[in-house]
Amino acid sequence: MKAAVLHDYDPSLKRDTWVRYEDVAEPKIEKPNEVIVRIGGAGVCRTDLHIVEGLWRERVNVKLPYIMGHENAGWVEEVGKGVESVKKGDPVICHPLITRGLSLEARRGNDMHDPDSMFPGINCNGGYAELLKTVERALIKLPTTLAPKDVAPHADAGITAYHAARKAAANLRPGDYCAVIGVGGLGHIGIQVLAALCAAEIIAIDRSELALGLARECGAHHVVKADGNEVEAVKAITKGLGAHAVIDFVGEAGTPAKGWEMTRNAGTYYVVGYGGKIEIPTMDFIVSEKSIVGNLVGNYSDLVELMELAHRGRVKLATQPYKLSDANTALHDLHHGRVKGRAVLIP
Ligand code: ZN
């Protein structure tokens, strides 16, 4: 089969070519619970650029060459002997993790914290290819309203935004305020999820006017330009008290301090984006009774619920298609901010 294969890291991200479009061996069913999916679309994520840079090298033990791509959807191609819930030809989206489901964490629904899991596209071969191997447990059948290439990025970008927004929405009452920092690939989904799940007033914060326009289309009630005075702006909207929930899709470049600051007492600051640091005096914690909650991708049930919202048209995803053979162009376009919405590779 054809695949876009990573052979070398490029720490400075300067090279023209990061992956090689070439013939590789097809994945083979080895265990009864395995499924081969014919890829209909594979989302291109900023994490893929971090992989090319070599940032993930020490976190995960992967040997090059290998195939990136952790946002995958397509059609079932072949199933192992024990697979009963899907058959050849079924359209599916892949939860990004491969788990057996036998750990206590997995049984409690915390797929992300299953100690026996694998993550295709991160620590084993992913979906920048014609075929991907995963397991029955990772698959969600798609309704006829959703084409694999149109929803593939939900397998990571969407599920991550949903996971955080769902947690926030569970604690937000009508009249409460929720601030969303960063209206990019994840943030614009987070706003739509909040609008669908709760009746809080949504305040979107971003540096770009374009992003703030998108935020309004997605259901934000207030928009705040991140010009250095965003904490004051949020305080002004919230009668001086701050937002009950703040979801930070940036997590660096000063947003953690500001996100904490614009959270009201007894409220919660949800961290999704990463790269920065949180430094808060312990006394501030006890006086304010604020909480900080981390968010990592999402559970299988999160992706099921998100597909329900997508099916009903409550969450829309902007995608930009590329041929799999143009993977380098897609990666470079992402790197240079030329992708509107999410790039999707189509074999
Ligand atoms: Zn991703």
Image (cartoon, rainbow, N blue to C red):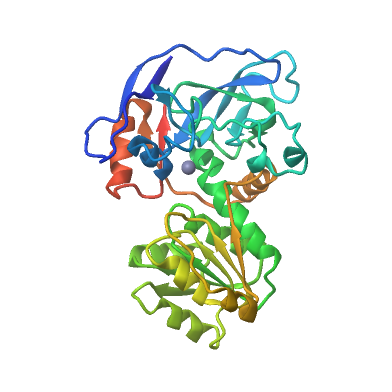
Kindly give the residue lying farthest to the front in the view shown. 282
Quarter location, residue 174: bottom right
- Residue 220, x across and y down, in percent: 51, 69
Question: Going 62% across and 46% down the picture, which residue do you hit?
Answer: 298
Q: Is residue 83 visible?
A: yes
- Residue 198, x across and y down, in percent: 66, 66
Depth order, front residue of 318/132? 132
Depth order, front residue of 317/186? 186
Question: Going 22% across and 34% down the picture, which residue do you hit?
Answer: 15
Direction from residue 61 to residue 330 in the image, left or right: left
Q: From the viewer's perspective, is residue 204 above or below residue 287?
A: above
Direction from residue 304 to residue 203 in the image, left or right: left
Quarter location, residue 238: bottom right
- Residue 153, x across and y down, in percent: 50, 42
Q: From the viewer's perspective, is residue 203 above or below residue 186?
A: below
Q: Which quadrant, please, contains the N terminus?
A: top left
Direction from residue 212 to residue 106 in the image, left or right: right
- Residue 306, x across and y down, in percent: 63, 48
Q: Which quadrant, please, contains the C terminus?
A: top left
Depth order, front residue of 240/129? 240
Question: Going 60% across and 29% down the picture, which residue do you hit?
Answer: 91
Q: Is residue 314 visible?
A: no
Quarter location, residue 143: top right
Q: From the viewer's perspective, is residue 101 above or below residue 262?
A: above
Q: Count how many numbered circles sit on residues in the image.
A: 0
Q: From the viewer's perspective, is residue 330 above or below residue 38?
A: below
